[in-house]
Amino acid sequence: MIIDCHSHVFQDWHGACGHTSVEVHLKYIQKNLTRPAAEVFRVRDGKRVNTAMLFSASDNTWAGLNDVGFRVGHYGRLEFVHEGEEYAIQYMPVGMQTIQSPPEFMIAQMLYAGVDHCILQAGGGYGAMNDYNAFAQSQYPEKFTGLLQIDEAVADREEVLAEVDRAHRKLGLKGLYYAHDFSRHGYARNLDHDAFRPFWDKIAALGLPAFVELSATPNYDKTSYIANLMALDRLMRRYSTLRFVLVMGPPVAYFAAAGRWDFPPEALAAYKRDNLLIEIMFPITWGGIWEYPYPEAQELIRGMRDLFGADKLLWGSDMPNLERFCTYRQCVDYVRKHCPFLTASEKDAVLGGNAERLFHLRT
């Protein structure tokens, strides 16, 4: 059973997608794109540029987002205007004529790639996803397991705690997606702040696995990332029976720039916690630089297996975003058909067995 632990369904991005307004949804998307792996170009001549025009370098909160007429386009593009010039970010595949991913679209992709089940993650850029993830899960329970999301920076508010109960008890969502995105409210508190104890107590009491996409905010550097990892480590030690999943895995740019993992001791100790699982997700971040079948990624997977063991690793894709770099089948096959250093049982664990046990899925 092949299980993708990181995929998405979502409604047409031209709408609010569960947020209180289209404007709020666009703010989430624009913030995500201040430092993307996606290609950015000037529409007039295709010249490649960066996204510095979207934000102020001195302010990494929403207040620092520039007014550039940011909007959702077609063919997977997000568009904006700067000094009279039209620019586009190729954030989704070119073949995505309208930016949306209904459950049936993902099921067709899964059938073609040979993927049996998907864990549906979230994120504000996709929308306020609890109802739509629950819709997909209820329509196709054999295909999807949905995660819930909240506004993490205000997780001490009563309405946020109530939303956790609604999302799990009423909608049936089976895990937490935690974006670690505090940019809307500022960075005064981190995920382990004492005010958030009632939230984490609730997640632990419900027994929900917590998928944490750890950021390098507020400064987008190695120092910020390690500080955030240490905050996560404090949570993992405080809630030793709560299962955490490190979404996207360790950042290659900080810890494997030379092609092999080189972790500082405090980071390695955090990654080795017994209650932490780690995603394997390289094509979505490095597929624009490395070529299939990604021998660089294979070497890093070998290093992760040697350091952490195959029982700690979960394969994920980030579909449908992934397909701007490679096909879904290729994203499976660089592990399924390659990685010869993994035994058959290790591949089974990484490609599905570990996720199956995490969510108690039936084979």
Image (tube, rainbow, N blue to C red):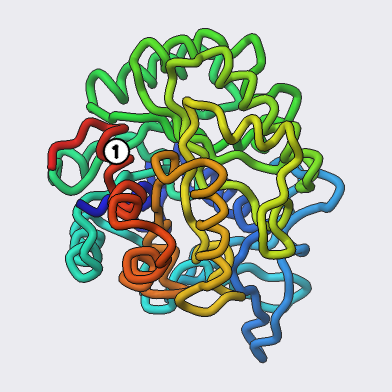
Quarter of the view holding residue 59 = top right
Quadrant into which the C terminus falls: top left
Regarding residue 9, the answer to whether it shows in the image is no
Nearest to the observer: residue 23 or residue 93: 93
Q: Which quadrant holds residue 133?
A: top left
Instruction: Give the SS element for disc 1.
Output: strand
Q: Where 19 falls versus 195 (above or below)? A: below
- In this view, 337 is above or below 142: below
**Which residue is located at x 60 percent, y 39 percent?**
214
**Foreground of the two, 120 or 42:** 120
Residue 14 location, x and y as percent?
42, 58
Residue 28, percent from left and from top: 56, 46
Kind of residue indicated by mark 1:
Gly
The residue carrying mark 1 is 146
x and y, in percent, of residue 196 in the image: 58, 14
> Depth check: 288 or 21 in front?
288
The image position of residue 252, as x and y in percent, is: 65, 56
